[in-house]
Image: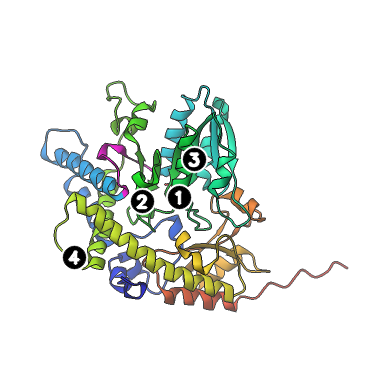
Amino acid sequence: MSASDFPVEMLRRRFPALRSAGSCVFFDNAAGAQVPDGVIEAVRRHLIEHNVQRGGRYPRSMAVDAMISWARSHVAALVNARQPEEIAFGMNATSFIRMVSLAVGQMLEERNEIIVTDLDHEANVATWLALERMGAKVRWWNVRQDGCLHPEDLRSVLGPRTRMVACALASNALGSVVDVRAAADLAHSAGAELFIDAVHYGPHGIIDVQALDCDYLVCSGYKIFAPHMGFLWGRYEALTRLPAFREDFIPDEPPGKLEAGTFIYENVAGMAAAIDYLAELGRTVTGRDGPTAETSLREECRAAMGAIGKYEQSLSLELLRMLQNCGAEIYGQRDERRLQERVPTFCFNLAGISPAAITQAAAAEGIALRDGHMYSPRLMRRLGLSPDRGAVRVSLAHYNTVEEVRQLGTVLSRLRPSAPPAPAR
Ligand SMILES: Cc1ncc(COP(=O)(O)O)c(C=O)c1O
């Protein structure tokens, strides 16, 4: 399906929040996306029909167990896990990164070096830096002037003591996609593991943990059209080895060992429904209809993400040209011929206007943007920006439109630099 055939108007009608927002434009998707009707219905149904604790012998409780196992298989299909037990559910991505990093911290011994990047969201940096107190040595895989991470640069940071490489699949500030498969090959050849933060990439492309050959990967459901929740994928053997906090009577096996306490079941039901939404989109774009078997669920999600990716590239092109026409300084990858190496997330500044003034002006016109450091303060410094001020981020999702991008263009083109302060007499 070409980008111009992407059924965006039909999809927008599936998102009640977009319908109720009227003419407002939602360009803050990197902070959390809207949810389709099926997700709302799944949460509602769970709360009405199954709002009980799992593990009981009565029908409602057994239905909760069944829903969790259904959702686990769904998420396993979404990321191409080898088995559903490789998926753990929880609050968010940060708490899973923290859980894995704390566990790795207990197993450091001779291999005590952790590699982090200055492209990443701080959730995938600070959590690993905290291991310094447990004897870890942190090494940096830095972005180059082009705002991208180059795998060749990782080679020189890796060594016989590297225990873990932690990096993003896509930058939540610049939108650049990282060649994590190359990073996995390099990390494994040094005897290290690879931890992927796929939070920002999740809504924009299909994740394939087997093709990426990573060892751990985290996502936030609320970025992938589900309610607030997160999930962890890990190689089964790697999860088995991790020391994780659990009550003594919980078997030391994934996924139970990684799911201490009660997670938010209704949001897990919503996550499964978000995957059903993607599968349905996959069927629409391939012209196939009918019930979904577990094997085809993956193919349907892949088709949906393929169509989303193409459509989002057309939005990226429009946004890139619009920002350039407005004289914006765009950070990171801005080559029209390399749009497939990015997701539709752009950070920019306009000379003489503060990022906060830009987002305020946009808000006054009903356009939701974000300004600041995007939880990537090290990246901001690397780009020569003060983290306090940062940049403006426009982050699109597949339900955004070219018309909305043009609306933003109209707002930006009207902005004038504020007058420089009068010289002191
Ligand atoms: C790339 C990236 N990593 C991690 C996080 C943190 O995710 P969570 O809120 O699920 O902990 C975010 C949130 O915006 C993110 O964009």
* Number of residues whose C-alpha sits closer than 10 Å to that of mark 4, classed few (under 14), some (14–19) or many (20 or more): few
Quick check: 185 above or below 382?
Answer: above
Quick check: 258 above or below 124?
Answer: above
Q: In the image, what residue occupies the spot 33% across and 57% down?
A: 225
- In the drawing, what numbered circle is on residue 207? 2
Q: Earlier in the sequence, mark 3 or mark 1?
A: 1
Q: Secondary structure at mark 4?
A: loop
Q: In the image, what residue occupies the spot 32% across and 48% down?
A: 79
Mark yes or no: residue 40 visible. no
- In the drawing, what numbered circle is on residue 186? 3
Q: List the residue tagged with mark 1.
A: 169
Looking at the rendered image, the disc whose residue lies closer to the viewer, 2 or 3, is 3
Placement of the C terminus among the 4 image quadrants? bottom right
**Mark 2 near mark 1, Cβ–Cβ under 8 Å?**
yes
Q: Earlier in the sequence, mark 2 or mark 4?
A: 2
Q: Indicate how the structure is coloured in the image.
A: rainbow
Q: Nearer the viewer, residue 2 or 311?
A: 2
> Residue 158: horizontal and vertical position, in percent?
55, 36
Q: Quadrant of residue 254?
A: top left
Mark yes or no: residue 303 visible. yes
Q: Earlier in the sequence, mark 2 or mark 1?
A: 1
Q: Earlier in the sequence, mark 2 or mark 3?
A: 3
Q: List the residue tagged with mark 4.
A: 288
- Asked if the stretch drawn in magenta spans residue 83, the answer is yes
Q: Which residues are magenta?
A: 79-92
Q: Could you tell me the amino acid type at mark 4?
A: Arg
Using residue 131 as the reference point, say whether residue 417 is left or right of it. right
**Residue reaching furthest to the front:** 189
